Image: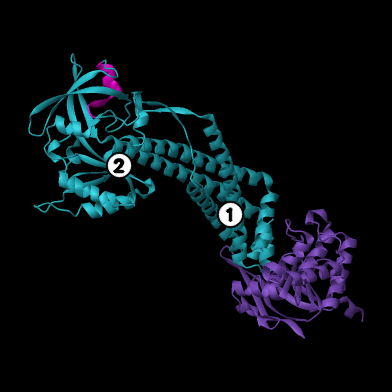
Chain colours: A purple, B cyan
Amino acid sequence: MTLVTAKDLKKTYEVGDIPVDAIRGANFTIQSASFVSFVGPSGSGKSTLLNMIGCLDPPSGGTLTVIGQDVSKLSKKESAKFRGTHIGFIFQDFNLIPVLTVSENIEYPLQMVQSWPAEERKKRVDKMLTAVGMQDQGHKYPRQISGGQKQRVAIARALVTQAKLVLADEPTANLDRDTAMRIIILMKKMRDEFGTTFVFSTHDPKIVGNAETVFNVEDGIVFESKAEGERDA
Amino acid sequence: MLKIIKIAARNLRRYKRRTLLTSSLVTLGVVSVLLFVSVAGSFKNMMIGQITDSMLGHIQIHQKGYLASIDSLPLNRNLKEMQALKIEEVLAANPAIEAFSPRIKLGAMFSNYTETTNIRLNAVIPEQEIATMPLLIKRIAEGKKEGLLNKGEIVIPDLIAKGMKVKIGDGIVLVATNKDGSVNGQSFTVRSIIEGVTGPGGRDGYIHLDDARTLLRMEDKEISEIAIRLKDLHGLNKAFAGLKAELEPIRNKMDRPVFEVHTWEKLTPFFNIAKMIDLMTLFIKIMLVAIVLVSIMNVMVMAVYERINEIGTIAAMGTGPGKILLLFLTEGLLLGILGTALGVIISLVSIAALKAAKISFDFGQQQGLILNPTLNPSDIISIALIVIFIAVLGSLQPAWKAAKMDPITALRHV
């Protein structure tokens, strides 16, 4: 099942009076429950692509369909609602809310975005804490846990709403090699357990090596390259 | 909403020093205003009480045109007997009125048989005057207080007693000219000496109403005015409007109004001082608003600036602009509530301390008055509501900015 479809997708920014084409007519599809990576050098446009797929930035041209919705036509309010319902985010700097505990951070989207009942929220948060191996850390604040644990919490928060699509911008960039590997394995496990699609923008060869679909992005042009598994075959 | 309050409260706790500093500023403002309101209000109430309870009453009724020429105490503008009876009938039926006192106001020559001076007099029915002016008796410095006076007796102001070297029990003569121009004299015994107070009628002497009629050779039972005491001064405007509506439509044969009704505010220049106190209170409140507005706005601008990345994160997760707005408004609200609560507590303690200290002050010729600062719950509530409203208002612009922030720009912020 196709989750994301981009046709002749364009994004142009105005830098002063000069238009800069960040994405130049990209065409790609992302399948449901896949592990997808956008790879490219800095400034190639991979983060722009992720922002458009995540309904944070509207396309300048072409069409972009995410989970059956043409997101290029959504208003800001509709985009926020769509993100809150269908998309989870994982950030390079973890971006946990420092005044909330681990449990409260995971609970945040359920309460502040989706208004789940308290009992349901608790069950769901406990399930996610267990799924990411943080069941004993729920009471701690982000400052009291390590970087790897923070990213686990961020993954739990992204998945807690049963989002179909999780977008991760350089999720391992601030982690050491071993921790990064454990996070990748965890995300794959989550994908298998919950059927969630993970889309990354990354430089990290470990993620690229684990991705099932890899899109290379260079100067705003996207082309699919064979994933490592396929190349081996 | 509870989650929003929890996040807002924790964010305030996160920046403890800044929260403490800002709420201290709000507290300082609230304390300043409440102390000023209580002390100034105490002074104002004391001043009004002195004026209304020992001289003027709350409302006075005269014949139309009397007040315009009150300085000359015109006897030809007295209320006739029938007019006075009509007024007394209206007053007796009015449930808002506690007491009233008919008076003749006159000027006379005061002689101790060796020297002569001028004196202004209020001729009264003692029982009615005491009921209408409860503080009058307290002003008597020497002599018998009970019953104020009897026929043939005079209560003289202390300045005349000193100037004319008159003592309690001395005989004096009053010489007065009546409205027809004939002069008459009458002997009186000095019953007591009364302290002067600042304000109209504050240095008048007192004689019995019947003595004044004899002295002025009045054939009719005329009076100059009726002073009225209300049961509740807060009902002044309503009682005044009621009396005005009842008495002012009454017209004479020439179709002109017969009576004029005035509140104490129209009868004394001290009302302007009371108004000035109110004006100063208003300016102090405006300063408080400015302090709260600037400090809360400043701290909330900082709060938004420091949390741009967080704002981007929660916006990316789908938190709507309304909730982001509410989050920062709640922070401002909590800061306002914290500062106000501390301010009210400190003010109440300070006021209790001021009361316990029994600070004395002088007002005009009255010395050793004790400062009695009090705070009405309505003052506390109104100031608390103003501060809290301004705290929210001060947070509005930064909160609006946060709510309208583009998530991508916010997430890129370092």
Estimate the x, y position of residue B367 in percent, counting from the top left. 40, 25
Quarter of the rendering containing residue A31: bottom right
Residue B264 - label: 2
Mark 1 belongs to which amino acid?
A: Leu
Estimate the x, y position of residue B306 in percent, counting from the top left. 66, 53
Quarter of the rendering containing residue A74: bottom right
**Residue in front for this viewpoint, B115 or B152:** B152
Estimate the x, y position of residue B413 in percent, counting from the top left. 67, 58
Q: Give the range drawn in magenta.
A: B151-164
How far is disc 2 from disc 1 in space, using C-alphas? Answer: 42 Å
Label 1: element kind:
helix
Quadrant occupied by the N terminus of chain B: bottom right
Extreme-top residue of the structure: B114
Write down the chain letter for disc 1: B
**Residue B319 in sight in this render:** yes
Estimate the x, y position of residue B254 in percent, counting from the top left. 8, 52
Above or below, A97 relative to B270: below
Label 2: element kind:
helix
Extreme-right residue of the structure: A233
Residue B38 belongs to magenta span = no
Q: Which residue is drawn at 62% across and 62% down?
A: B324
Residue linked to disc 1: B333
Mark 2 is surrounded, within 10 Å at the Cα level, by few (under 14), some (14 to 19) or many (20 or more) other residues, namely many
Q: Viewer-nearest of labels 2 and 1? A: 2
- Mark 1 or mark 2, which is nearer the start of the sequence? 2
Quarter of the rendering containing residue A78: bottom right
